[in-house]
Image (tube, rainbow, N blue to C red):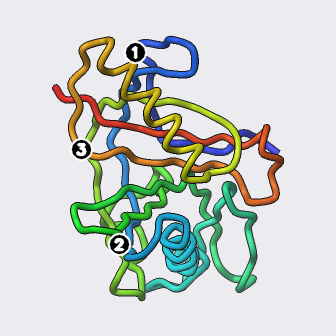
Amino acid sequence: MGKTPEPNWRSVKKEGNIEIREYAPMIVAEVNITGERYDAINDGFRILAAFIFGENSVQQKIEMTAPVTQQAEQASSKKIAMTAPVTQEETEKSNEWKVRFVMPEEYTIATLPKPNDERILILEVPAYEAAVIRFSGFNTDKNIASNEETLKAWLKKNNTRTAGRPTYAFYNPPWTPPFMKRNEIMIRVAK
C-alpha cells in the first residue's frame, strides 16, 4: 500500500515537531456540526463519508484511503482517491465545528460530484500558510489542549502573527495504536 495522498504543502521553517507550511489551493467538502468536539467530528465524519461513498449527484464513489478504509457499495462506481487528513475547526458559534475532507487534487468545483445532503458545502480553499504541530496519541481534549498551548507559545516566541482559529487534523483510523497515530494542530499565519 502506498502513501496516503495529502494536500500539497511545502515546509518553510521547521523546529522539532513544529513547522511553518505553505499549502497549495485545495477543494474541501465541509459540514458544520453543533455539539461537543469529539461527538461533532464523529457526526460530521459520518455525513461526509456518506457523500464520498456515493450519496452524491452521480452516485460516484470517492475512495478514502485514510483515515477510513474503503468500503465498496456499487461495483459499477468509479473510485477516486481521497486525501488525508480529516480536519475539525471550531466556528464563531459556541459548540459548532467545521468538519472537512480534502478532495483529490484532480477535481475542480465543476467536476466534483454534488452532495445529495444539503448540509455539505463544497469549497475552494485558496493557498495559505500555517504553523503546524505534529503529535501522536489519542485526540483527547487534554492531548489537543497541551499541544495547542505548545504551538501558541512557539508562535509567540517567534513573533508570528496568526489569523483564525486552530484546525485539528486527524490521519488514522480508530484502531491505530496511540503511539502510531498522527495528529496535527494548524493555525494560519497572518500575511
Q: Distance between the residues labelled 3 and 1?
A: 20 Å
- Bin the neighbour count of mark 2 within 10 Å (Cα to Cα): few under 14, some 14-19, many 20 and up: many
Q: What mark, if any, has residue 164 been given in the picture?
A: 3
Q: Which amino acid does label 3 sit on?
A: Gly
**In the rendered view, would you say 158 is above or below 134?**
above
Residue at 33% x, 67% y is: 122
Residue at 54% x, 52% y is: 141
Q: In this view, does 120 lie to the left or right of 69?
A: left
Can you give x and y, in whole percent of width and height, for residue 81 in the image? Answer: 61, 57
Could you tell me which secondary element the residue under label 3 belongs to?
loop
Q: In this view, does 176 lie to the left or right of 34?
A: right
**In the rendered view, would you say 159 is above or below 61?**
above
Can you give x and y, in whole percent of width and height, for residue 42 in the image? Answer: 57, 72
- Check if mark 3's residue and mark 1's residue have beta carbons within 8 Å: no
Q: Name the residue under label 2.
A: 32
- Bin the neighbour count of mark 3 within 10 Å (Cα to Cα): few under 14, some 14-19, many 20 and up: few
What is the residue that sits farthest to the left in this orientation?
191
Could you tell me which secondary element the residue under label 1 belongs to?
strand
**In the rendered view, would you say 153 is above or below 63?**
above
Could you tell me which secondary element the residue under label 2 belongs to?
strand
Whichever of callouts 1 and 2 sits on the residue coming sooner in the sequence is: 1
**In the rendered view, would you say 135 is above or below 138?**
above
Q: What residue type is labelled 2?
A: Asn
